[in-house]
Image: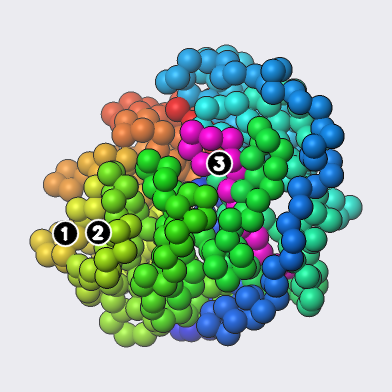
Amino acid sequence: MSKSTFALSIATLFFTLSACSSSGSDLPDSARLATAVAGTLEVVSKGLATPNPLQTPEKLGTEQPDDSATRPEPSTPTGVLRITYTSAGNVWLIEGADPPRQLSHTGHADRVILSSDGVFVAYVHNDFESGVFELRVVNADGSGDQVILDQADFDSLYPLKEAHHFLPSQMAFLSGTHRLLFNTQATFEGPGLLKNDDLLSFDVDAASLERLLAPGSGGDFYPSPDGTKLAIIQATSIGFSDSDGSNLNPELLSFPAVMTYSEYSYYPEPVWSPDSSHFAVVIPSQDPLAPDPTSTVWILSVDGKPPIQTALIDGQSFFTQAFGAPVIAPDLNKVAFMRPGTEQNDEHLVFADEDGGSEIVYTTGNLRWVGWSPDSSAFVYSVGPMDLQLGAIGEPPQPLGNGVQFRWVNSEDYLYLTGSRGDWALMIGSVGAAAEEIVRPVGDFIAYDFVP
């Protein structure tokens, strides 16, 4: 593949991701679009966003009536699957076997995120034609739909300078809380998005906005399983902090910016150990189109000890992780990567131990990595863009159906969208059983999130 062809392909790829992205902390992040040269844009981004005093928007200030007594408790017992999704531009919710119920009525919803207890749905209202942008939250029973931050609020976070607007980038509720964590990006009149590498928190219960990490000090964030720590990722460094932004240990690991040949910066995605003591990350070699690309596996500990390089793999992880799916298994014992096949567009899907040993070539074809099961016993990949296959090392693949936005609910059950633009169905399946249709949402592009 030539570099010019790659630039076109990667632009198409991230258009697709932005159109069909799921939400939550593990969503494919189309907001990673930044600029053609990651290192240069890192400097520009930090220069654009100079901190200024942070104030809670008046619409959610202290004069707002205290409705804590009337806020809904989880309406279904723990263990009942709750799914929120967009349909015809509004937010809907399904709880267990109950019929879908509509939560919002303002239209133009294009991202949805559920709190871990299922009480709140945060969503983005984005009316491109009128230029109205709002970050909103609604109760799971459909009451209390309100604006958290509007465009004016985002634009007042920092001096705009050359930027046209500030928008939220990554967003996620911190598990066990009603704190919505998010970072921001700058948009411009022309092409390009720049991450501000910040971190903010909105407490829905207290209706309070707090800046946890100033621009240049934050980045993409990944909470530990116990919710006490955050892995903080930038385009050239990785660190961590407490979940409230305190005890920041920046640049625990530094690395060269990965070239993308397009208008975004590459941010690696870490995988936490189950006990929250450390996390692993795979960083591609600096130029993914150079001959013989490599991938480096690192372990970073929250006790601040120097990072440990466990492997230098002869293989491609940049494209493998392009859809936002980490290649490290959740138990941190296996790594997936690709190597070129003998035919054009064919690649070998290869697995190795965390130290790079015991390589196994699982299959070959026009492949896309989708992700590991939560218990690390299985994995999903697609042949072409949508032909989903369930695999396990030592076992032949099993077809799952055509789909996108595949997400594991647990180690047995999964969700995905099947169909095409304007004709989608949300499916649920279990390992060893055929998938079934849950609902047919209306719209060209569908977002969904869930909590088990």
Res. 330 in view? no
Distance between the Cα atoms at labels 1 and 3?
32 Å
Q: Which mark is residue 335?
A: 2
**Residue underneath mark 1:** 353
Question: SS at mark 1?
Answer: strand
Viewer-proximal residue, 246 or 167? 246
Question: Which x, y percent locates residue 446?
Answer: 63, 42
Crowding around mark 2 (Cα neighbors within 10 Å: few <14, some 14 to 19, many 20+) is many
Instruction: Residue under label 3, please give it.
Output: 173
CB atoms at circles 2 and 3 under 8 Å apart? no
Span colored in magenta? 173-187
Q: In the visual, does 275 lie left or right of 167?
A: left
Whichever of callouts 1 and 3 sits on the residue coming sooner in the sequence is: 3
What's the residue type where badge 1 is placed? Asp
* In-front residue for pair 398/278: 278
Helix, strand or loop at mark 2: strand
Marks 2 & 1, CB-CB < 8 Å contact: yes
Among the 4 quarters of the image, the one containing residue 84: top right
Residue at mark 2 to residue at mark 3: CA–CA distance:
28 Å
